[in-house]
Image: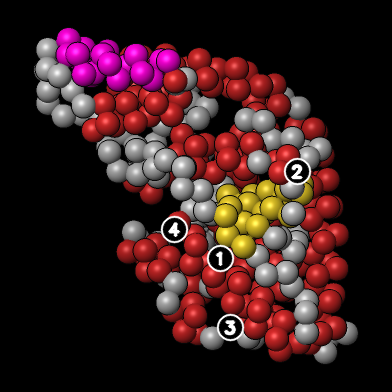
């Protein structure tokens, strides 16, 4: 089974990225043949500064390796190092009905948040389809907000196969219902778009300051509190083991604990989890040659698949 995942390098990765995407795909490396790419072509729709894109791409590579990505198990690569996906995007675009893309909600969502309109933003699902089909992925883990894009990939793979003969595997979406929605410091879903994140590798003081800004209700120290209605506890339970989680929930329900104390406990837990990973990341940052080698080898493996796929598609369409 071949598994593909990608993430855009559009800023510092945060707790929402970690629990929503990074940890699941890293833990799933042993479940099949894993391909993970840094989607820097996609990031061009929102980043227009070359140095920023290079820096963010490098940061994502360091973050994943520090968090446990194993390049022996996983082909880890930059999207732009597999240029075959762009030609495949064009080939697929000749079969893509405009209405299929017009029905995708992501374009309207992103433009409503202020991203400038562009063909790249509009055709985002088509490039995503090429990413998936180029390496002949069987399974693509996605959040529910990306399910529609997977359906586009399935539709186009089937349409191509019906018109030109069996060329692409038809991918399946893997949607994990147990992945929690991670709240940001303002209570909305944690997202760089909302500037409400807690960055994974922020310095301890900066991370603590972010945690202390988490929005809570106005209950006093003495009041009984419902842990399931608290943004602080929602983050605490993601980081804590079962015993610590139950103990903290009991303290909420007993009263006598203020939200400030709960935030300090969360900050301590956050530091315990990510301090060792931060040290690993700092060591990797000093070994740029190793990171380059990992990305280069991952691209070699991905390109081998993409070149074969593209050649088959070209032949099928009469471009040989």
Q: What residue is shown with label 2?
A: 74
Q: What residue is shown with label 3?
A: 96
Above or below, 209 relative to 55: above
Quick one: quadrant of the C terminus? bottom right
Residue at the extreme right of the image, as rendered: 320
The reply to whether discs 3 and 4 touch (Cβ–Cβ < 8 Å) is no
Residue ID at (84%, 52%): 300
Q: What residue is shown with label 4?
A: 145
Apparent side of residue 221 relative to residue 231 in the rendered image (left or right) = left
Apparent side of residue 120 relative to residue 184 in the rendered image (left or right) = right
Apparent side of residue 168 relative to residue 173 in the rendered image (left or right) = right
Residue 83 badge: none
Structural distance between the alpha carbons of marks 3 and 2: 31 Å
* Bounds of the magenta segment: 243-261
In depth, the one of 1 and 193 nearer the eye is 1
Residue ID at (72%, 82%): 161
Residue ID at (26%, 14%): 251
The magenta stretch spans residue 292: no
Structural distance between the alpha carbons of marks 2 and 1: 21 Å
Element at label 1 = helix
Structural distance between the alpha carbons of marks 3 and 4: 21 Å
Mark 4 / mark 1, whichever is N-terminal: 4
Q: What residue is shown with label 1?
A: 150
Structural distance between the alpha carbons of marks 3 and 1: 14 Å
Above or below, 113 relative to 28: below
In depth, the one of 227 and 37 nearer the eye is 227
* Colouring convention used in this rendered image of the protein: secondary structure
Element at label 2 = strand
The reply to whether discs 3 and 2 touch (Cβ–Cβ < 8 Å) is no
Structural distance between the alpha carbons of marks 2 and 4: 25 Å
């Amino acid at each position: 089974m071949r598994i593909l995942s990608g993430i855009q390098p559009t800023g510092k990765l945060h707790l929402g990225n970690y629990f929503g995407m990074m940890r699941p795909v890293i833990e799933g490396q042993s479940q099949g043949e894993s391909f993970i790419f840094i989607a820097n072509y996609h990031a061009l729709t929102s980043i227009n500064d070359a140095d920023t894109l290079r820096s963010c791409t490098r940061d994502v590579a360091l973050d994943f390796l520090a968090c446990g990505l194993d390049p022996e198990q996983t082909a880890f690569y930059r999207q732009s190092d597999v240029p075959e996906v762009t030609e495949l995007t064009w080939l697929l675009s000749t079969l893509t009905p405009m209405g299929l893309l017009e029905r995708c909600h992501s374009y309207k969502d992103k433009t409503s948040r202020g991203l400038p309109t562009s063909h790249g933003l509009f055709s985002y699902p088509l490039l995503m389809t090429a990413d998936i089909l180029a390496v002949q992925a069987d399974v693509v883990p996605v959040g529910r907000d990306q399910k529609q894009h997977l359906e586009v990939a399935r539709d186009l793979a089937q349409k191509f196969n019906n018109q030109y003969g069996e060329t692409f595997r038809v991918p399946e979406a893997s949607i994990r219902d147990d992945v929690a929605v991670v709240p940001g410091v303002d209570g909305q879903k944690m997202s760089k778009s909302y500037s409400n994140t807690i960055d994974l590798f922020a310095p301890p003081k900066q991370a603590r300051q972010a945690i202390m800004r988490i929005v809570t209700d106005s209950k006093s120290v003495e009041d009984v509190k419902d842990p399931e209605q608290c943004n602080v506890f929602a983050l605490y339970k993601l980081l804590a083991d079962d015993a610590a989680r139950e103990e903290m929930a009991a303290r909420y329900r007993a009263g006598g604990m203020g939200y400030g104390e709960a935030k300090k406990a969360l900050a301590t837990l956050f530091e315990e989890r990510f301090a060792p990973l931060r040290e690993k990341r700092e060591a990797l940052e000093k070994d740029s040659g190793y990171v380059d080698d990992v990305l280069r080898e991952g691209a070699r493996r991905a390109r081998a698949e993409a070149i074969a796929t593209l050649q088959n598609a070209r032949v099928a369409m009469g471009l040989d």
